[in-house]
Image: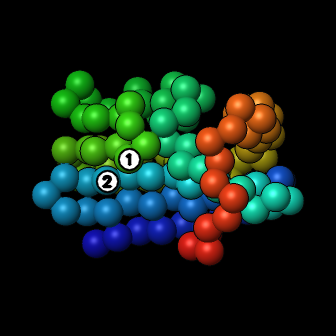
């Protein structure tokens, strides 16, 4: 089973993706709507601090793709992320952080998948 949710923020578009296999793999992509620049944001300190508390010490969440060993935990993470990304106050704070991160570089020019 794979889940993908597209969410439009204020200045960014987000793709939350979760893939179920032997483990569960989780990614969050962000696209700046004005420049079309893209980045995987799952490994940003802001995202890690917001959502990693749901994970166990056996899960891997410091890389751009998080590996979650328990499917129930993955679904709790999924629901929590959906709730947060649909909250305007959360998005305002996140997008301020993303604006700063974009100025540091590392965002791809375009990606047609988002």
- Circle 1 packing at 10 Å, graded few (<14), some (14-19), many (20+), is some
34 vs 49, nearest the viewer? 34
Residue at label 1?
A: 65
Residue at horizontal 75 percent and vertical 62 percent from the top: 36
From the viewer's perspective, is 15 left or right of 91?
A: left
Q: Looking at this view, is 63 or 86 the one in front?
A: 63
23 sits left or right of 64 in the view = left
The reply, left or right, for residue 20 in relation to residue 95 is left
Quarter of the rendering containing residue 12: bottom right
Position above or below: 107 against 31: above
Circle 2 SS class: strand
Residue at disc 1, secondary structure: loop
- Residue identified by numbered label 2: 25
Label 1 with label 2: CB-CB less than 8 Å:
yes
Query: Where's residue 24, x and y in %?
Result: 26, 54
Mark closest to the chain's N terminus, 1 or 2: 2
Quadrant including the C terminus? bottom right
Q: Is residue 89 visible?
A: no
Tell me which residue sits at (54%, 49%) in the image. Answer: 40
Q: Quadrant of the N terminus?
A: bottom left
Classify 33 as above or below 81: below
């Amino acid at each position: 089973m794979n889940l993908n949710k597209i969410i439009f923020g204020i200045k960014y578009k987000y793709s939350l993706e979760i893939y179920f296999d032997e483990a569960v793999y989780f990614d969050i992509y962000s696209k700046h709507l004005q420049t079309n620049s893209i980045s995987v944001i799952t490994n940003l300190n802001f995202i890690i601090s917001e959502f990693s508390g749901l994970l166990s010490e056996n899960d891997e969440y410091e890389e751009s793709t998080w590996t979650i060993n328990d499917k129930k935990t993955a679904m709790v993470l999924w629901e929590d992320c959906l709730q947060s990304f649909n909250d305007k106050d959360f998005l305002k704070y996140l997008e301020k952080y993303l604006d700063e991160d974009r100025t540091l570089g590392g965002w791809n020019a375009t990606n047609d998948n988002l």
